[in-house]
Image: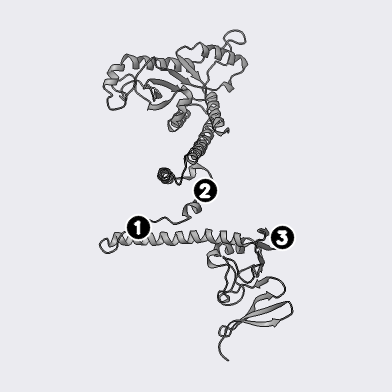
Amino acid sequence: MADFKGERVEKDGPTKKILFYHDTVAGIKQLSSEIYKKTDQIVHYPRGFEGGDKYNTIKKFTYLGFKGKLPVGVVKSITFGWGFTKTLNPFAYYLNDNHDIDEVIIEKGGKVDLDLTNKKLYLNEKSLETLQNAFSSIFKKNRDEVDFVLKVNLHSLFPSKISSPPKTYISNALATSLASWGNAIDEFSDADKNAIKDLFDKLSIGTDFLTKDALAKTKEIVDNKYIQETLKKYKDLMKLKTDGDGLEKQWQEFLKDNSWIFSSIFAQPVILYKREAYVGGKTIDNQNGKFNDFLIKNSLSDNVSFLEIKTHKTKMLDNTSYRGEDVYSATKDLTGCIVQVLNQRDNFQKEFYATKGKSKGKGNFETFNSKCVVLIGSTKDLDENQKYSFELFRSNSRDVEILTFDELQTKIESLQKLMTTK
């Protein structure tokens, strides 16, 4: 008898045909498929390469409504043992390792469900196509990346004989990569951020891809996301309870990294001109001179302003009243900070022309009755009587504006609310 590999009808009944797979050389004979006669139904029994079960738990695939033309994502040839295609092996192995599923039911236009109670997985042709496309993109990306790295290295070793490979984008690679993004900006590396920026810049050039409305909406989303992240970091700093130089440095770093906040502090279009700017030496950055925390410049008039910061835990008023129940004295930290920023402005203005002349090439700056701001403490740490004294003191501080950290937080939150309000 000649060797044989394939299906043979073992039973041909009134409702269905039952077929077994035979491999006379390997000695395999096992149930392979069932073809129903009165309903549009086919059942496959996945077979391993050497016979036996192909999967640990999945025993059969039931197809409904396909009229003999099976969908993408499944094996259509008995030679390869039925079941999912090689491309969908990761999907099949996941089911194998994590869920006790014994039947996969695939119905044309049917439901998609994972019925763990009855050990059944329901799919339709669209869900299979989605899976097939997703994994195909990954496999193609991996193959192309391996091929690209190979050619790059071969060109490096044999530049005169092997040309450098052209750069080609793999379709769906970006969509696949971003599908795993958890929506936190911190997940992106600096290289990721630069690549996204370059891509956005290039796409912005062509009006056929990004319309003016789309660009505006994208910018709105990006700005809002950025403010959300900034506000989260701000609130995390506000939760810190140990005061000192270390906390002040953290606030300085935060404001340096988020210098757009200065526009909220000064209520005008400003930029960070210099952090720890030296205001009493022979140049704007002379290390022998006096310096303040931040030197801010109006982006339109070039007029500079002075900002001194403490921390949100810095006490602004004494704990005990000075007179009666509602008269409290300002603390040494508050008055000292005010005198310090006034002293810096005074030194800067006295030596302005000498400083400006010796700071050529470092940008233009002017001083027209420059504004002074002190960022300090929190009104939430004051009781009602202390707030009364603080407001009296603040409203009579003519040359120095006093802003608290919780008030600045409210300004940022108001900006976020304004951007998200339709």
Dot placed on the residue nearer the N-terminal end, 3 or 2: 3
Q: Which amino acid type corresponds to the residue marked 2 in the rendered image? A: Trp
Where's the N terminus, which quadrant?
A: bottom right
Above-or-below relation of 339 to 257: above
Q: Which amino acid type corresponds to the residue marked 1 in the rendered image? A: Pro
For the point 68% across and 70% down, the residue is 40
According to the picture, the residue beneath numbered tag 1 turns out to be 166
Q: Residues within 10 Å of mark 1 (few under 14, many from 20)?
A: few
Front residue of this view, candidates 125 and 97: 125
Res. 205 image quadrant: top left
Q: Kindly state the secondary structure of the residue where label 3 is placed.
A: loop
According to the picture, the residue beneath numbered tag 3 turns out to be 117
Does the image show residue 314? yes
3D distance between C-alphas at marks 3 and 2: 32 Å
Judged by depth in the image, the label closer to the viewer, 1 or 3, is 1
Q: Residues within 10 Å of mark 2 (few under 14, many from 20)?
A: few
Where's the C terminus, which quadrant?
A: top right
Res. 379 image quadrant: top right
Does the image show residue 310? no
Tell me if label 3 and label 2 are in contact, CB under 8 Å.
no
According to the picture, the residue beneath numbered tag 2 turns out to be 181
Most extreme residue toward the top is: 323
Judged by depth in the image, the label closer to the viewer, 2 or 1, is 1
- Residue 415 pos. (x, y %): 53, 29
- Residue 377 pos. (x, y %): 52, 22
Front residue of this view, candidates 389 and 39: 39
Dot placed on the residue nearer the N-terminal end, 1 or 3: 3
